[in-house]
């Protein structure tokens, strides 16, 4: 199994299996929402696309620059999704970086899995079980490298084993320089932006490892939306 | 001074000062050629562009996939340029990755400097002397991340100090995981390609630090060519 890493969303890094990371916070939120009972998460790139999907049994969530979108039920804090889900079965999510990368990954990988630290062990097992080459794809911040996603990419690549490319080797070495996951994700610009929005508690929350035994997977894809459901 | 790093050539990372790295081997070759007496190095992206510049006092150098181009005077091994230069004053160079990045950097940075390990100390001093923000730009391998360039980017960013972005922090941490420069550049796909071409000796040669006290700088730019001359 070859393991590639794309540190920024514009890199055309592909493989049969794509693992998408936006640890602060879209992919952590997706994992938690599915774990809490949503049947599906529909990720869309644009706010208007999200609004067009509103309706019975649908909750809207999303942010732009870490601020909840006006009129939406939720922002993009995974802590908002810890409580059990009532009647709503579908979460529609649009975020600055993560959703757009999911759309791009769905266009070039046959299987697309969603990774966070919360489901680290489960996603590695699921990827390995495919027996296919893997591309670990980082959302970054507005197109740029984000050290929190690179840290998680390193953790995923290290756990996968196989034959890492240069970027995967670098990610593994980078991750090994941090004494803890929280330190791995807390020092970059994503974390600074979250602190600026007063959401500091999201950071240690997203740094918890392998507390959810599920793997969000793209089950439907369209030009401007992907639908994710849980597998375990 | 803000210090940014672009790990792959497609990233639109810019700043007033760009430092371009293709340590194996284009930027090492440029440094050595100017140190050995060439007055200028003209970098072009395409083989035909190089051939069009042939003439008196001009030597042609370049490779595609580490193989010397047919009819050219030199390949892209910096060791070919150690001997003093006779009557020729201009070297025309076209390489797979480095030349193309130089053209891209020249399009978005006011000042473009060329870095290798050979001139590490000199290029850091020259960049710092500008007092401007710096973008450290890696050539990579055919558009992908290359760990040898990332290693040198980390060394440059560390020596520059200032305020590193996420990518610069990651590059510095990555570089610090290697006990020596030779180990920093010898473990990736660039080095493997060079060994495959039988040019193993280029690797320790390019790993020598701060042995040349000069900084190649872009002094002219056109749509398909940049002209480099030495400053010290």
Image (spheres, coloured by chain):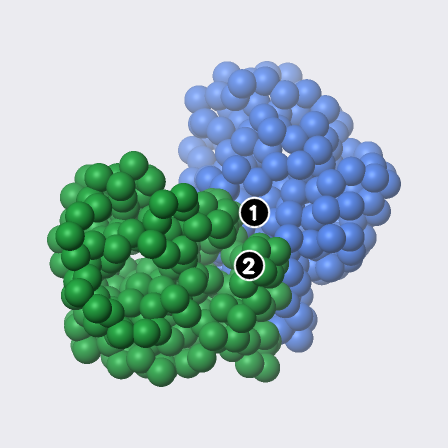
Chain colours: A green, B blue
**Image position, residue B73 (x, y; %):** 55, 33
Q: Tell me the residue that label 2 is attached to.
A: A194
Question: Does residue B30 lie above or below B159 as drawn?
Answer: above
Residue at 17% in and 48% down: A55
Q: Residue at x 66, y 25 (%)?
A: B227
Residue B219 in view, yes or no: yes
Residue B124: x %, y % from top left:
78, 49
Q: Quadrant of residue B208?
A: bottom right
Subunit ID for the residue under disc 2: A
- Is residue B126 or residue A203 the one in the foreground? A203
Q: Camera-side residue: B116 or A129?
A: A129
Which label lies toward us, 2 or 1?
Answer: 2
* C-alpha separation, residue under disc 2 versus residue under disc 1: 24 Å
Tag on residue B6? 1
Q: Are marks 2 and 1 on the same chain?
A: no
Q: Is residue B35 left or right of residue B168?
A: right
Q: Residue at x 19, y 62 (%)?
A: A88
- Asked if A57 appears above or below A161 in the picture, the reply is above
Near mark 1 (Cα within 10 A), the count class, few <14, some 14-19 or many ≥20, is many
Q: Is residue B177 above or below residue A147?
A: below
- x and y, in percent, of residue B144 in the image: 43, 50
A224, A127: nearer the viewer: A224
Q: Considering the numbered disc 2 on the image, is that residue within a helix, a strand or a loop?
A: helix
Residue B229 is left or right of residue B21, and the answer is right
Q: Secondary structure at mark 1?
A: strand
Left or right of residue B175, residue A42 in this image:
left
Quadrant of the rendering where the N terminus of chain A is positioned: bottom left
């Amino acid at each position: 199994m070859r393991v590639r890493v794309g540190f920024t969303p514009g890199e055309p890094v592909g493989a049969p299996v794509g693992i998408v990371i936006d640890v602060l916070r879209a992919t952590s939120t997706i994992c938690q929402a599915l774990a809490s009972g949503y049947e599906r998460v529909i990720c869309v790139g644009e706010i208007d696309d999200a609004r067009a999907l509103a309706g019975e049994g649908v909750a809207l969530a999303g942010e732009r620059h870490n601020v909840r979108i006006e009129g939406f039920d939720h922002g993009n804090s995974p802590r908002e999704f810890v409580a059990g889900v009532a009647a709503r079965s579908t979460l529609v999510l649009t975020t600055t970086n993560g959703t757009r990368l999911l759309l791009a990954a769905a266009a070039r990988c046959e299987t697309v899995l969603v990774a966070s630290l919360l489901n680290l062990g489960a996603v590695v097992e699921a990827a390995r079980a495919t027996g296919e080459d893997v591309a670990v794809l980082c959302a970054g911040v507005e197109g740029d490298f984000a050290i929190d996603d690179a840290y998680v990419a390193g953790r995923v690549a290290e756990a996968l084993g196989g034959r890492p490319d240069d970027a995967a080797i670098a990610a593994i070495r980078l991750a090994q320089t941090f004494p803890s996951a929280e330190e791995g994700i807390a020092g970059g610009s994503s974390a600074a932006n979250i602190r600026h929005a007063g959401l500091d508690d999201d950071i240690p929350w997203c740094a918890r490892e392998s507390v959810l035994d599920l793997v969000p997977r793209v089950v439907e894809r369209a030009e401007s939306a992907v639908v994710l459901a849980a597998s375990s």
